[in-house]
Amino acid sequence: MSEINRREALGLGVAALAGSLVSASAFAGAQLPDNVSKGDYESALKAWRSIVGEEWVFADTATLQPYMKKFIPDPFNRCVPMGAVAPQSLEEVQAIVKVAGKYGIPLWPVSTGKNMGYGQASPATPGQVILDLKRMNRILEVNVELGTALLEPGVTYQQLKDYLVENDIPLWIDVPTVGPIASPVGNTLDRGVGYTPYGEHFMFQCGMEVVLADGDVLRTGMGSLPNQKTWTAFKWGYGPYLDGMFTQSNFGIVTKMGLWLMPKPPVYKPFVVQFPKVSDIDRMIEALRPLRVSSLIPNCVLMMGAAYQLAMFKRRDEIYDGPGDIPDEHLERVAAENGLGAWNSYFALYGTQDSVAAIEQVVRPVLTAAGGNVYSEEEMHDNPWFHHHQQLMQGGLNLDEVGLTRWRGNGGGLAWFAPVGPVTGDDAREQAALATAILSKYGLDYTAAWAIGWRDLHHICALLYDRSDEQMHRRADECYRELVNEFGKRGWGVYRVGTAHMELAAQQFGEKNREVNQTLKRALDPKGIIAPGKSGIYN
């Protein structure tokens, strides 16, 4: 058995037994890490309580409940935290890390733990203590002239938006799906995407403060200079660029981050272009690609399938109560009845009145010639799906997509499967056919969207299932694994993955990639204290 497969098998086997090995009251059903005794753990808890206070250390079943909730498939109950601790300052994080190092107890850092379809606060492997940074929620600086911000990880998008509005600052944020409760720092570290021209979140990040595994502090870029002036203004600093190392990794704990914010444009005009047939997917993408690559359309283009859109506000049995998959013709008809196309592409123009009008005259004919129907705000009236995206594309906030979790019932099952390919109609058509076939095999629907970043095409499949149905829960897990494997074989790797499947995703990228990551891990965190298993990285 290879080392990769050994890790995977060990994790699954150990997790299936978790709960019978230790006291539920002390460890909430989770397993102690290797080489950590019950006495060591109790000593660590005592030390952490002295650092943050009794009320901010969680180590029993009742107080750990908020950290247990997850939507992703985890049928072996693998992703279960052993405890949680919530610091309020950089100094408390440093002290907590030193205690963890002393006793060999791994920490799983989260900002707010609200990455809905990727695992929320759950760790990738058993035996970890959540390092919950939600109390570190200060907006440290907003520079209005430069359009920069410096934030702690517990700041939410809603908090930042409110700050800008309350202080009449003409800057926009860029938000992910569940922005009100999510963290700009956490989403950026996972390389999430949004909806405005600043939608590639890591591209608009600038400067980090990082606590390393020994408790020391690194400031990246220009931040390590005494009396620095450009920490959040100049990305690169001097020497090797380090910020990227701390995204989707377990090399350090980010406690501050700089972000660039978008100046509010004089004119904002949102559009949707609807394509009526499920089979229109390739012509839609071929039409939109040159507009996006040339930046005539400046924001991340979201192309939402009708099933995905309907699932936001409706349940499956309201749409279709027949056997098997929802037929394309039926889906197209229901979509039209609800003011939707089979595919609904949302984009916006930003600028002056003259520039927006001029670009609209270029964009509309291209999309209508491809068979799309282009509508603006005046034509869509109170269409709830248009309103949803109209808000998002100007940095607005809502929780509409939480409705996806109710598609199959109240069990709350959702996992994002997010492979990336080049922006071509052929790739989209082939990916859609493959995803549909695999999902159908496991009795699940193809509820998907696409996003054109720059020259990349994100395929965002929402695995929607009833988590309370044990058989469906297991099928969803098996389905997700087959999707990762089959797409990986064809060169379409995932750009982001939930905590239960990080090891599997890492396997797709080869041993040399893993060896380099492991070398970095051993150099920066030789005891493996920070988030073992994150992105499939171990020491």
Image: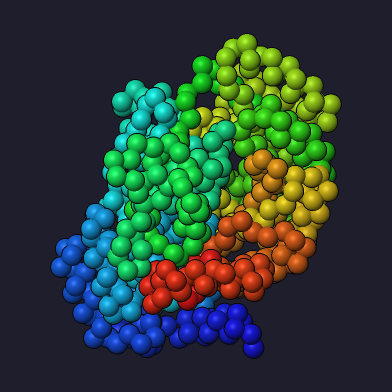
| Residue appearing at x 29%, y 40% in the figure | 227
Q: Residue at x 31, y 75 (%)?
A: 101
The reply, left or right, for residue 227 in relation to residue 506 is left
State the residue at coordinates (83%, 48%). Answer: 426
Left or right: 342 as drawn, with respect to 475: right
Place of residue 256 in the rendered image (x, y in percent of width and height, measured from the top left): 35, 49
Viewed as shown, does residue 38 lie left or right of 427? left
The answer to which quarter of the image holds residue 123 is bottom left
The image quadrant where one finds the N terminus is bottom right
Name the residue rendered at 35%, 49% in the picture.
224
Q: Position of residue 341 (x, y in %)?
A: 73, 36
Q: Nearer the viewer, residue 115 or 172?
A: 172
Image position of 384 (left or right of 48): right
Q: Position of residue 84 (x, y in %)?
A: 31, 67
Q: Looking at the rendering, which quadrant does residue 441 occupy?
A: bottom right
Residue 54 location in percent, x, y?
Answer: 17, 66
Whether 33 is drawn above or below 486: the answer is below
